[in-house]
DNA sequence: ATAAAAAACTAATAAGTGTTAGTTTTGTAA
DNA sequence: TTACAAAACTAACACTTATTAGTTTTTTAT
């Protein structure tokens, strides 16, 4: 029947992964069947296996693509010469922009990583742990340099990460709140606080 | 074989719901089978149906128990005579304590509500929307009373809710960070900001 | 035009799902 | 002890799942 359409400048596999991300976000990994995915792609289910290894591979690709993007960004940020506050500012803004650009993938990576199987699950968790540790280091340095209050560094990181991760549930209000408004307000609140 | 043990001061049904919450959090709703749940309860799968209506009822009970607790707390908070900042302070602390008391249930309500079927799904969402609206009202009043910066009210609510919801991922560090430290630090950061 | 490779198809399989029916055991009250 | 109800059990069903095998169509390159 119809042939799988490759996404612009991407393989057919990429097109499948993209559709999978959409469905996995909408319905969850376990609740999405290969038949559903196939229908979305415009093909019969077994045809998918000409392009991918299996359902679990799809989840792996989505999760690690996201994880790698964040890891790379943080590594690049670390070596720049800026104040810690400026770095945190940029980190938060990066999360917000990623949420705009690849909402589905980010959502899936944040919500469905539990469905990964070892060794991918362990890899994913250790990569995330490493990301957290790097942020904690950053906050600690900010405290040492007296840029940042003497707050518990891990709690600070936790709060920031939780807040930006929760951005997914702003998607529902994208029309009401422009991205730049959100960005500036959230950065301001997280760094400067709510109280006048 | 073994009889289902009722949890202290609770029906057998409650015991099943409790075990279900644990499994649903650990593996996800769809990834948890009734046979697994039955094993955890110490019984064969069909025996569960002497106490519950079905798998979906379990999810409904968990989600709405949580939602109702938060709704009630907010309603009680609204009628008290305190500053808005104090109210927000208490609201954040309530979320943190709930996370301590009923981690499994909270996690499931936050992550698996998508698996609810209508009309429960719609009810759940509208209840959550109402909760958000009430918080937005609170922040707006705080701004009017000049207790709070002139920040976008919905963004503020979003940030707070995201941050406290992300507390689930602090559970891994419970031993390192006592609850009161977390509570004070997070409230401080959210209300006063990170920057010195 | 033709041969080779890629990718679609149909059919089928083995495993797992929630749930029901029917029966037996267990606990409770008279 | 006996009768009744609650709750366990076994067996089975109807359905869905991801995936494989084998075949046919489509695309690509010579």
Image (cartoon, coloured by chain):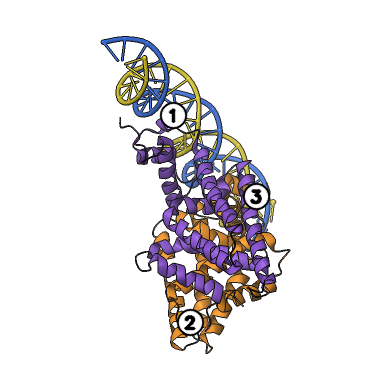
Chain colours: A purple, B orange, C blue, D yellow
Q: Which mark is residue A126?
A: 3
Give the residue at the far front of this rendering.
A81
Q: Nearer the viewer, residue A70 or A81?
A: A81
Tell me the chain of label 2.
Answer: B
Is residue A160 in sight in this rendering? yes
Chain under numbered label 3: A
Q: Residue at x 61, y 65 (%)?
A: A157
Q: Position of residue A140 (x, y in %)?
A: 68, 66
Q: Position of residue A104 (x, y in %)?
A: 44, 52
Looking at the rendered structure, whether the residues under marks 1 and 2 are on a common chain is answered as: no
What residue appears at the point 61 percent right and 64 percent down from the top-left corner? A158
Q: In the image, are marks 3 and 1 on the same chain? A: yes
Horizontally, is B147 left or right of A42 in the view? right
Q: Main secondary structure of the magenta part?
A: loop
Q: Is residue A2 above or below residue A154?
A: above
Disc on res. B149? 2
CA neighbours of label 3 inside 10 A, class few (<14), some (14 to 19), many (20+): few
Image quarter in which the C terminus of chain B is found? bottom right
Residues drawn in magenta:
A5-9
- Furthest toward the right, the residue is B175
Image side of residue B42 versus residue A68, left or right:
right
Same subunit, labels 2 and 3: the answer reads: no
Question: Could you tell me residue A20's position as x and y percent?
Answer: 43, 43
Question: Which of the 4 image quarters holds residue B153?
Answer: bottom left
Distance from Cα at disc 3 to Cα at disc 1? 32 Å
For the residue pair D26 and A169, the one nearer the viewer reads as: D26
- Alpha-carbon span between mark 2 and mark 3: 38 Å
Q: How many marks?
A: 3
According to the picture, the residue beneath numbered tag 1 turns out to be: A50
The secondary element bearing badge 1 is classed as helix
Q: Secondary structure at mark 2?
A: loop
Q: Nearer the viewer, mark 1 or mark 2?
A: 2
């Amino acid at each position: 029947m119809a042939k799988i359409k490759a996404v612009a400048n991407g393989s057919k596999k990429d097109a499948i992964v993209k559709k999978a991300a959409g469905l996995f976000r909408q319905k969850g990994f376990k609740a999405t069947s290969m038949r559903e995915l196939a229908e979305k792609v415009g093909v019969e289910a077994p045809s998918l296996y000409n392009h991918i290894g299996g359902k679990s591979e799809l989840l792996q690709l989505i999760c690690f693509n996201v994880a790698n993007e964040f890891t790379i960004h943080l590594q690049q940020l670390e070596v720049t010469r800026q104040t810690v506050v400026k770095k945190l500012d940029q980190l938060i803004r990066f999360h917000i922009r990623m949420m705009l650009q690849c909402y589905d993938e980010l959502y899936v990576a944040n919500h469905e990583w539990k469905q990964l199987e070892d060794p991918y699950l362990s890899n994913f968790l250790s990569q995330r742990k490493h990301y957290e540790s790097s942020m904690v280091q950053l906050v600690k340095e900010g405290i040492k340099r007296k840029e940042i209050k003497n707050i518990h560094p891990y709690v600070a990181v936790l709060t920031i990460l939780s807040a930006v991760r929760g951005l997914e549930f702003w998607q529902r209000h994208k029309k009401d709140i422009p991205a730049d408004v959100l960005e500036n307000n959230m950065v301001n609140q997280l760094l400067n606080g709510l109280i006048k």
